[in-house]
Amino acid sequence: MPRKKTLKLREGTTVKEFSELIGLKFSDVIKKFMELGYMPTINQPVDTDAALLVAESFGIKLELASVEDETVVEEIKDDTSFLKHRAPVVTIMGHVDHGKTSLLDAIRETKVTETEAGGITQHIGAYKINLHGKDIVFLDTPGHEAFTAMRARGAKITDIVVLVVAADDGVMPQTVEAINHAKAAAVPIIVAVNKIDKPDANPAKVKSELAEHGIISEEWGGHDIFVEVSAKKRMGIEHLLEMILLQAEMMELKANFDKEAKGTVVEAKLDKGRGPVATLLVQNGTLKVGDALLSGVHVGKVRALIDDIGKRIQVAGPSTPVEVIGFSEVPSAGDTFVVVEDEKRARQIALTRFQKHRSLEIAKAKKLTLDELYTKIQEGQIRELNIIIKGDVQGSVEAIKDAFENITHPEVKVRVIHTSVGGINESDVMLATASNAIIIGFSVRPETKALQTAEKEGVDIRLYNVIYEAIEDVKKALEGMLAPTLKEKVLGRAEVRQLFPVSRLGTIAGAYVIDGYMSRACDGIRVLRDNVVAYEGKLATLKRFKDDVKEVQTGYECGILIENFNDIKVGDILENYIIEKIASKL
Ligand code: GDP
Ligand code: MG
């Protein structure tokens, strides 16, 4: 008779534990596994997929529970009286040269070294300061790249973003990027208007420019906190810290101090003398020396805990950055970590995860694509379509943005989460991964690294040269009418290193293949200048020395002539592609 109860299968359960869990004889269970083609030994962790099938064949419903989930479940059950205030975790973001590093230094110097004799501060990627008896943690990895890379991995470690804007420079492209990244993560922003010591500082201009991006100061009727500072002259630093504490108070940040620790890997490296060293941010619970650690597929036992000023400590509570020695390999920054009951169990779970790694990689690659949009809408999986727009000029970016925002659909809201002028870079792809967005490029191209990341993460990048086509495609996708697409496949890229004008033919580009290959049989070739398409046409000849050839691979030089195009320049990137027909998935 089938039983109705749903049992929880913990990660890393051995076959023996599994048969006990479902209450059946070990020999019967093993037999079923073997029928399915698995040969597990008694103390080996079960393959979870196989275990689900085996249980089902006995009429038992199983649910998978990852270690991280287990702790989440406990948290809900946690009596809220166990929860205590924890310190806010802050990331500093902003445009290059606006003073992120200087501000981090200013804060550290005014608040950390003054209390430490000798002022030895050890760099561990994060530090804690104290103001009026209250702590604030600063992540010392400024820049939205790190921030979004972490979020793309599912880690949410920042409570507050401090947006640094130089008062003599105003809102710049990376300021806007930072705003959009913080908004996409729903993290509150505190604006630090920096460099107010400068004679040409114009804080009012910063305020009005930020207002255009929806960041409105309280004195202008908004809700955003602005603080004027000078990182160089150490002015306004304490006020900024007070505002961070105020914001934190409103957020009522809490954690349970009395349980096994859980958190995120902030940085990790292999140290010559000490082996794998990781900076962890404890987010819940308390980490202790001797604890068994699990992070992704890596395990460890805490041999030593070192705090942000280089002092050995025995325990680290919530919102504490701490350096940990004791991992057997280097874990990945951005991964979560959990403390489990012992090293044996940590190893069991790590092994299961490692075996699953491949299927997880495939699952990870299943990001949203325009082709699948309609199916997902039908299945009720999609309520919002997030879009990132990159274009060659501000005008076309604005036009596409307006057009997208005017698309109405009964079930789906179209949201443009980021726009900017220029080629598609890795940061755009990371933002798309973190927000499950698609990227629309108008007369621009992805950088090679962005293309590789997009492929790895499964991010859909759509490139257009006609605004109307971009809008039509999104509309059609929403209606499930997207025609079988002709998809372009880039074969390779070559960098122009030399020019050879040949009177009769035109200019032959002496180029070096930097990735993939160049093919005589390509359907088209384009000339990229700073990732913007300067020309698109047909390849006329492909040569190695004096000979015509079919293909030239990465790492080799070649001569390329493009039909009807002679305005080529040294430094241009030549990209050749073929057009493949992809059957519509609808
Ligand atoms: P980051 O690129 O955002 O990390 O910027 P940095 O902290 O490296 O600062 C860039 C430049 O601006 C450096 O030359 C700093 O000395 C200068 N700077 C930073 N803060 C201030 C400030 O408050 N006033 C003045 N006058 N210069 C500053
Ligand atoms: Mg810097």
Image (cartoon, rainbow, N blue to C red):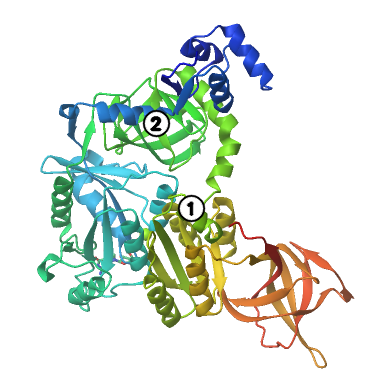
The image quadrant of residue 577 is: bottom right
* Quarter placement of the C terminus: bottom right
* Secondary structure of residue under mark 1: helix
Q: 330 or 435, which is in the foreground? A: 435
Provide residue 290's location: percent of width, then percent of height: 38, 19
Residue type at tag 2: Glu
The image quadrant of residue 69 is: top left
The label shown at residue 376 is 1
Is residue 101 among the parts visible in the rendering?
A: no
**Position of 6 relative to 511 (above/below):** above
* Secondary structure of residue under mark 2: helix
Residue 251 shown left or right of residue 363 in the figure: left
**Position of 2 relative to 284 (above/below):** above
Q: 460 or 152, which is in the foreground? A: 460
Q: Residue at 74% of width from left, 61% of height from top?
A: 554
Q: Which residue is mark 2?
A: 68
Provide residue 576's location: percent of width, then percent of height: 70, 71
Q: Residue at 56% of width from left, 60% of height from top?
A: 371
Residue 159 shown left or right of residue 224 in the figure: right
The image quadrant of residue 485 is: bottom right
- Mark earlier in primary sequence (1, 2): 2
